[in-house]
C-alpha cells in the first residue's frame, strides 16, 4: 500500500481497496477501513510514524472490503464512526450480506467468509445525503446508489472519495461483470458524479484522478454495452429463464465461478442489469411453469 498525498488535507492509501485519510489540525478521518485487521494495522502504523492523528472513521458502504478493518480500528483507539443510513444496519449486523445474497435463507457455512462478512462495527452517527460540520471537518455527502443500496460518497477539501460508485477501467475489465444491485441507479449515480464540483476523485479501486470524467464515461459506456448485449440475448431467445440468462452472461464473459459465493455475486450483478432493462420498459417478466421468464416488451 502506497500513501499518496492529494492536497494539503487529503491523502489515500493506494491498494487493492483504497483507504482515504483527511488531516485537519488535531483530527484525522479514515475513509473506509480495508478488508481486515492486518490491513488496518499497516495503515495505523504508517499514520503513527508520521504523527498523523486518527479520530474519525467514515464508511462509504457495507461491503466487507471497505469496512472489514473497522473493528480492529475501533478496538485499537477511541474513534467516532459515521456510516450511511441503511448500510449502517449491515455494518452492525454483517451476516445480513450472506443472508441477502442467499435470497433470505440461512447462509450455508461457505458463505460466511471475510469477503462477504466482516466483523461488526459500532456506528456513532448515521448520515444521509447532506452538508455536515463535525469536529472541525466540513464535508458534503452524496447518495450514490446502484453498487450498494445506500452508498454515500464524501466531498471534503475539494476531494471526492467516491466509494465504488465508479471503477477504474482496469477494474471494469478485470471484473467483467461488475457487482451492482441496480444498473439503472448505478448509471444515474455516474451522471451525478459528473455534476459534483471538485478537484478530483478517488474511487474505491483505482487511482486518484484530477480529471476523472473520462473514467466515469468509460463506466457509463461499459454498462450500456452490457445492457445492449443482455437485451439482444433476450430478443434472440424470445422467452428465457433467469437461470439461463445468468449462465449465458457468465459463459460469454468467461468469468470464474467455482464457488457458490461467486455465483451468487454474479447472479445479483446480472439481475441488476435486468432491473435496468425493466425500468427502461425494454423487457418484461412473468412466472411461467414455475420459472422466472423474461421477454422483450412489445412496443404499443
Ligand atoms: Zn463495494
Image: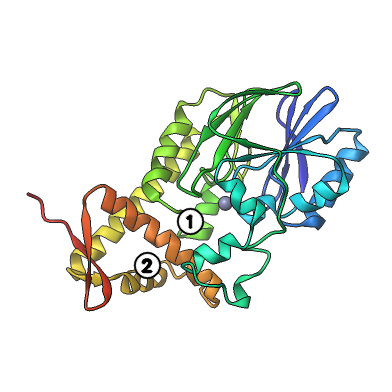
Q: Residues within 10 Å of mark 2 (few under 14, many from 20)?
A: many
Query: What colouring does the structure picture have?
Result: rainbow
Comparing 121 with 4, the one in front is 121
Comparing 212 with 295, the one in front is 295
Vertical side of 32 occupied by 227: above or below: below
**Residue 188: percent from the left, percent from the top?**
39, 39
**Residue 242: percent from the left, percent from the top?**
32, 69
Residue marked by disc 2: 249
Residue 209 visible in the current orientation: no
Residue marked by disc 1: 178
How far apart in space, not on screen, are marks 2 and 1 (Cα)?
12 Å
Vertical side of 137 occupied by 245: above or below: below
Residue 193 visible in the current orientation: yes
Identified at 86% across, 33% down, the residue is: 53
Q: Residue furthest left?
A: 300
Q: Is residue 39 left or right of residue 85?
A: right
Q: Residues within 10 Å of mark 1 (few under 14, many from 20)?
A: many
Vertical side of 252 occupied by 290: above or below: below
Amino acid at each position: 500500500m502506497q500513501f499518496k498525498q492529494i492536497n494539503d488535507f487529503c491523502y489515500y492509501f493506494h491498494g487493492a481497496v483504497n483507504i482515504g485519510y483527511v488531516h485537519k489540525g488535531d483530527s484525522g478521518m479514515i475513509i473506509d477501513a480495508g478488508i481486515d485487521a492486518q490491513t488496518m494495522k499497516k495503515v495505523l502504523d504508517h499514520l503513527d510514524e508520521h504523527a498523523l492523528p486518527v479520530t474519525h472513521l467514515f464508511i462509504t458502504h457495507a461491503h466487507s472490503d471497505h469496512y472489514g478493518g473497522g473493528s480492529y480500528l475501533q478496538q485499537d483507539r477511541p474513534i467516532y464512526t459515521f456510516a450511511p443510513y441503511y448500510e449502517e444496519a449491515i455494518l452492525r449486523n454483517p451476516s445480513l450480506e450472506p443472508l441477502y445474497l442467499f435470497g433470505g435463507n440461512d447462509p450455508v457455512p461457505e458463505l460466511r467468509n471475510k469477503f462477504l462478512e466482516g466483523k461488526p462495527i459500532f456506528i456513532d452517527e448515521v448520515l444521509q445525503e447532506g452538508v455536515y460540520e463535525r469536529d472541525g471537518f466540513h464535508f458534503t455527502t452524496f447518495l450514490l446508489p446502484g453498487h450498494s443500496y445506500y452508498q454515500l460518497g464524501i466531498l471534503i477539501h475539494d476531494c471526492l472519495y467516491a466509494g465504488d460508485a465508479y471503477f477504474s477501467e482496469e477494474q471494469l475489465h478485470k471484473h467483467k461483470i461488475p457487482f451492482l444491485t441496480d444498473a439503472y441507479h448505478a448509471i444515474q449515480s455516474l451522471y451525478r458524479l459528473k455534476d459534483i464540483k471538485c478537484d478530483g476523485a478517488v474511487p474505491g479501486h483505482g487511482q486518484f484522478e484530477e480529471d476523472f470524467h473520462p473514467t466515469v464515461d468509460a463506466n457509463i459506456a461499459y454498462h450500456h454495452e452490457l445492457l445492449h448485449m443482455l437485451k439482444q440475448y433476450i430478443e434472440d431467445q424470445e422467452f428465457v429463464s433467469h437461470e439461463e440468462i445468468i449462465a449465458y452472461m457468465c459463459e460469454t464473459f468467461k468469468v470464474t465461478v467455482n464457488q457458490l459465493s461467486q455465483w451468487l455475486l454474479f447472479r445479483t450483478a446480472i439481475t441488476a442489469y435486468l432491473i435496468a432493462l425493466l425500468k427502461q420498459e425494454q423487457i418484461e417478466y412473468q412466472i411461467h411453469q414455475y420459472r422466472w421468464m423474461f421477454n422483450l416488451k412489445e412496443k404499443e
